[in-house]
Amino acid sequence: MKSFQLKKRLIIFIRGWGFSIIAAVLIATSFKSAIADWNDVPTGSMIPTILAGDRVFINKLSYGLKVPYTTWHLLRWQRPERGDIVVFYSPKDGKRLIKRLIGIPGDEIALYRNRLFLNGKPLQYQIDQESISQTKTQLSKPDHQYLIENLAGVHHAVMVTGIRSPLDSFGPVTVPPDKVFVMGDNRNNSADSRVFGFVDMDQIVGRATYIALSRDGSFLRPRWDRFFQKLL
């Protein structure tokens, strides 16, 4: 008798509130899956643009509309472009990563002692005084250099070191159709396409556009000056 009453109450609950709760959860998770989300950054591979402890906003509608919970596109209205900061699934282990898009299909990419060559032409660089002043107290070492890189008209900050590294030279390689080449702005300390190869465009989750909030990873103190900062 008690078992029957319990089942009856459960059915009433499901009919009354259960479906509403399930619908609300599906709507919320579908929104995060297909429209907008955030990504917590645990490493320094994108220094000086993004620091460990930053939480970045991801616009998942930047390039098109996907079926929620999948990588299938319903519509495409824009292709990823050079200089975009993209969130994607690693071709190596499926982990979600954030890097800068360096090469689109057909591009020839090479790197010689941390200087990028795009389609046979070297990119232009200049000293980045702003990044030096913002990060030197926490992150800088004597061998760190902060530069502004001109990537096909997109000017963004990068960090390099004077220490020779297996990552400071490679290529040239040509980006295949429907693939992209990505790199971290922290050029000597980033596992990116130099390590795991090209990234399939369908594995791009969206574009990182803003730092939603930031906190020091060691002490969990807010870094107020980075809140709502636009990513370039």
Image (cartoon, helix red, strand yellow):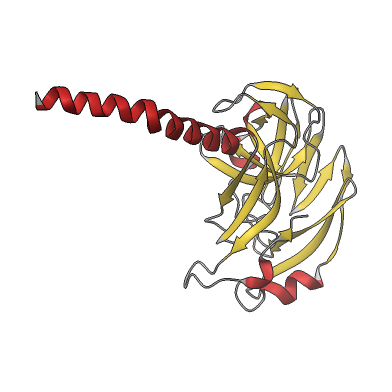
Quarter holding residue 182: top right
Quarter holding residue 161: bottom right
Residue 204 point in image, percent of width and height: 65, 34
Q: Residue furthest bottom?
A: 137
Q: Quadrant of the N terminus?
A: top left
- The residue positioned 70% from the left and 54% from the top of the image is 210
Residue 3 point in image, percent of width and height: 12, 25
Give whichever of 50, 120 is nearer the camera. 50
Give whichever of 166, 89 is nearer the camera. 89
Answer above or below: position of 177 versus 164.
above
Query: Is 124 on the left-hand or right-hand side of 79?
Result: right
Quarter holding residue 156: bottom right
Residue 116 point in image, percent of width and height: 79, 48
- The residue positioned 74% from the left and 77% from the top of the image is 133
- The residue positioned 67% from the left and 22% from the top of the image is 73
Residue 98 point in image, percent of width and height: 62, 46
Give whichever of 143, 69 is nearer the camera. 69
Query: Is 11 on the left-hand or right-hand side of 87?
Result: left
Q: Quadrant of the C terminus?
A: bottom right
Answer above or below: position of 100 versus 44.
above
Q: Is residue 95 visible?
A: yes
Give whichever of 111, 13 is nearer the camera. 13
| Numbered marks: total | 0
Q: Is residue 186 visible?
A: no
Answer above or below: position of 205 versus 124.
above
